[in-house]
Image: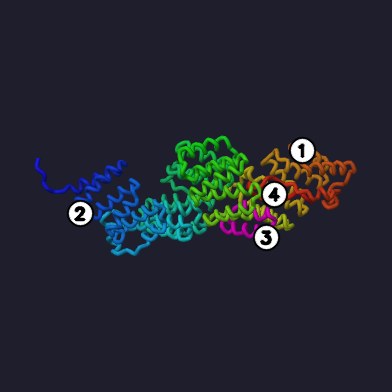
Amino acid sequence: MESSGKVPFSQLRNLVRSYIDKHLYETALFWAEKSMSLSNNELQDVYWFAQALFYTKQYQRAVHALTSRGLHESNLACRYLVGKCYAECKKWQEALDVLEMEQKCSKSNLSSDLGAGSKKLEAAVHHLRGLVYDAMDNGTMACDCYKEALRNDVHCYEAFDQLTSHYMLTPNEGSEFLNSLPFEEQCLSEEIPLLKYLYEIKLQNSKKSVKLLTPYESVSNSLDVIVCMAEKQFSKCDFQMCYKMTSQVLQKDPLHSACLPLHISCMVELKKSNDLFFLAHKLVDNYPDQAVSWYAVGSYYYLISKHEAARRFLSKATTTDHNFGPAWIGFGHAFAVEGEHDQAMAAYFTASKLMPGAYQPLLYVGIEYNKTNNPKLAERFFNQALTIAPDDPTIKHELGQIAFQNGNYTKAEKCFREALENVQSLSSGVILDTWEPLVNNLGHAIRKQGRYEEALKYHQQALVLVPQNSHTLSAIGFVHSLLGNCEQAISYFHKALSLRKDDTFSVQMLGQTLEQFSLAILPGEPEEQLPLSSDAAEQSVTGGQSMIDTSIEDVSMET
């Protein structure tokens, strides 16, 4: 059969795309080169030749194929591909220079030859610029680029994920930005509620529930949505529920990237060292080049109190991905737990720089300053954290402890009450056992103001949350002794000592209460008239474990 003499350009071009879809990149490259030669270097053939080179990881060849013909100067898609190649080679400045070149042709011709939407292509360029700025430690410019990407294409989820997962925006900034996006201009009216819902649940630091419209109820089965809901449970300190949800996700998708850091954090909170050990090994075997793998290893060593090893592996996680915030916070914890305050604060400051919209790094810096007897600086950082998360009970709890230490018991009570109200509003009135220290400390602040009956009520509430807590039992015994209820006081001090035999405060108070009982001191005698020794009055027995592992000691039981 004789040939028609025409070159089958469309057939060759379809072959290239077909083999790229089948991940046969070398085959695609072979036919892309032939198509480019036969068409005398037409734009789309050169572009797909460069694409095939990109897929085969021949980045410098791809750059040369486009730049030697000047296509990156006149076509945005070609410029974007050159920028991607430079980024893959970690040549950040070269990538930025290319992406920020002035266009030499009208925007109407940017992508017409390559079948891409102009706005969506511009969004991709802005997103890539954001990644480059991130790699160059310029978070402010990166944030602006991600915002611009979303303004050009509201469907560009990767840009939104960068903003939220790296905490580049405060809760208020995130809500305001989301409301400013042109959904009506770029979306079908039917998809707007779904898109807004999916984005709103990513703004988890607001801790507000988002209503799911009936037509989209089935999307709640999405693993990504379940992870967002699990993050909300974690922010409420409901670690059991969070762990249940993340386990459900990992059962269906064992290496779900967004779920893994949250799941690891839950394991640390719940002290599941064996499970964390196996997960860390699995991650290192499958993803040795990813920060989350070494974060898991470091978290395991932190959990079993091998802090030097924890620091080594958490440092490796930060080296693998400098922008991985959880590793920096864990790195700080591994220093803080051994009293290395300067190194801990350096790690927290780095985390704060990387996650300007997150309150946790500022909170931990404040805690470290308080540990080093600098309550004024601690309070300053707590207040900064409060501007980011004004309804967070943990911050208010720490502010209450500062006020208590300064002898301002009225302010301490106010902070503790506000924190407790926030806890109840977050959990629909239910108080989890995680918040037992907060309830106890509210009792301490009230006791310091002489309202013993009211203080006793809160200590008893704390005992319901965590029944076998020697600190709470000591606190109840102490208040009973102040009320003159010697028999009850003696009973509670005995219970406290049965759980913690080295409780010096309970030992001394038991002896003094027995003496008081034998002398038949009348009930209702003022606190300062009780026969407390100076040693007992100086005791700094805590009223419960801290809300956070690296926190300062809770308020004392001293009179």
Q: Is tag 4's residue or tag 3's residue first in the polypeptide sequence?
A: 3
Does residue 346 appear anywhere in the picture?
yes
Q: Amino acid at mark 1?
A: Lys
How far, Cα to Cα, is label 1 from label 3? 36 Å
Marks 2,4: beta carbons within 8 A: no
Q: Which mark is residue 204?
A: none
Does residue 178 appear anywhere in the picture?
no
Q: Amino acid at mark 2?
A: Asn
Residue assigned mark 2 = 40
Q: Position of residue 555 (x, y in %)?
A: 72, 50
How far, Cα to Cα, is label 2 from label 3? 72 Å
Q: Is tag 1's residue or tag 3's residue first in the polypeptide sequence?
A: 3
Q: Which mark is residue 376?
A: 3
Magenta-highlighted residues:
368-396
Secondary structure under tag 1 reads loop
Crowding around mark 1 (Cα neighbors within 10 Å: few <14, some 14 to 19, many 20+) is few
Question: Of residues 369 and 541, which is closer to you in this image?
Answer: 369
Residue assigned mark 4 = 553
Q: Position of residue 435 (x, y in %)?
A: 64, 46
Question: Of residues 285 and 371, which is closer to you in this image?
Answer: 285
